[in-house]
Image (cartoon, grey):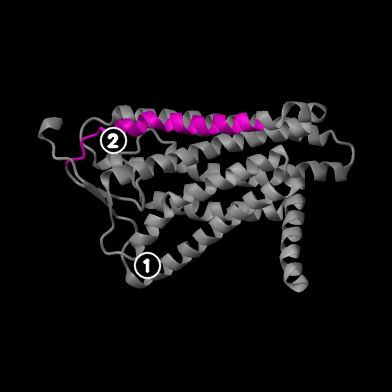
Amino acid sequence: MDLTNCTRVSEFILLGFPHIWGMNITLFLVVLLLYILSVAGNGLIIVMVKVDRRLQKPMYFFLSNLSFLEMWYTTAVVPMMLTNLLSAKTTICFYCCMAQSYFHFLFGITEFYILTVMSFDRYLAICQPLRYTTIMTSNVCLQLSLVTWLGGFCTILLQTVLVVRLPFCGSNVVNHFYCDIGPMLKIAGGDTHLIEALGFLIAVAVILGSLMLTVVSYIFIISTILRIPSASGQRRAFSTCASHLTVVSILYGAVLFIYLRPSAKHSSFSLNKAISVLNTVITPVLNPFIYTIRNNEVKEALRKALGKKVQNPLIL
């Protein structure tokens, strides 16, 4: 398509979900509740790691990074989703849409990197316990965290720039509740094969690459745990990994289905929407509960924090 004869659209219409008023109100209330729980739960984990000395360890430093990412990952999508559920005009400006898409993938990709670093941290703690404290210093933890953020920023930047340069001159209806790249490519003019190929390569490199590193780490972890002579020692060692494994299973299961396909342009998005709700709304709510329920140190820190809040009014 010749860009000189193209009048670029100034806004997109997010098709979202079918507009049945009663259902939209119900869905709005449910999503709003889940969003509040997500932000509050992940925020609480960040505060607990900051104020409780027992949680100021590499594992919880990376957990607070993950919680911070979850808060912004869901915030990049859910507020606009809530607005559209109650609005007859579900539009978003062109550059707002591009920004939403970029930050959604930035936080999502960085989350994969953080989860991979967390699996490496568990590998060192269980398989190399004598060297753990000398390797995972505070400076190393900070550097690993910065690398994951820089990696997320760089990974998605080129694809976003290429999408912005596409001629969106015809339909402006995006068949999704947020600006996902797949539905946007479906309505774009010009040749999108390069962007699709690049997106598929990013998915393979980020999703499968990080998953492979995580699986390798856990092969060594499980083999080390099985060599621990006492059953109580095995349970104690595995309990430090159980929450991370649960989160990894939920997250990778959803994104493998959505993004790891050679062509997003010619696929149906109905099922993708349902799985995207799981990925962007429900999973960020589950993570704080998973780490709280399955981790004794976090539970004890939470009990201590709640205990102080109960005692302070009595003292006054």
On the image, the x and y values in percent for residue 37 come to 55, 60
User: Taking 33 as reference, is 229 left or right?
Assistant: right
On the image, the x and y values in percent for residue 210 come to 56, 32
Q: Quadrant of the C terminus?
A: bottom right
Q: Secondary structure at mark 2?
A: helix
Residue at the location (72% across, 63% down)?
Answer: 306
Can I make out residue 217 in this image? Answer: no
Residue 157 belongs to magenta span:
yes
Residue 102 belongs to magenta span:
no
Which residue in the structure is indicated by mark 1? Answer: 24
On the image, the x and y values in percent for residue 13 come to 26, 52
Kindly report which numbered mark, 1 or 2, lies closer to the viewer in this rendering: 2
- In this rendering, the answer to whether 72 lies above or below 31 is above
Q: In terms of image quadrants, where is residue 258? A: top left
Q: What residue span does the magenta drawing correspond to?
A: 141-169
Residue at the location (58% across, 37% down)?
Answer: 114
Q: Secondary structure at mark 1?
A: helix
- In this rendering, the answer to whether 211 lies above or below 242 is above
Which residue in the structure is indicated by mark 2? Answer: 164
Task: Say which of 162 and 194 sits in front.
Answer: 162
Cα separation, mark 1 vs mark 2, equals: 31 Å
Task: Say which of 312 and 158 sits in front.
Answer: 312
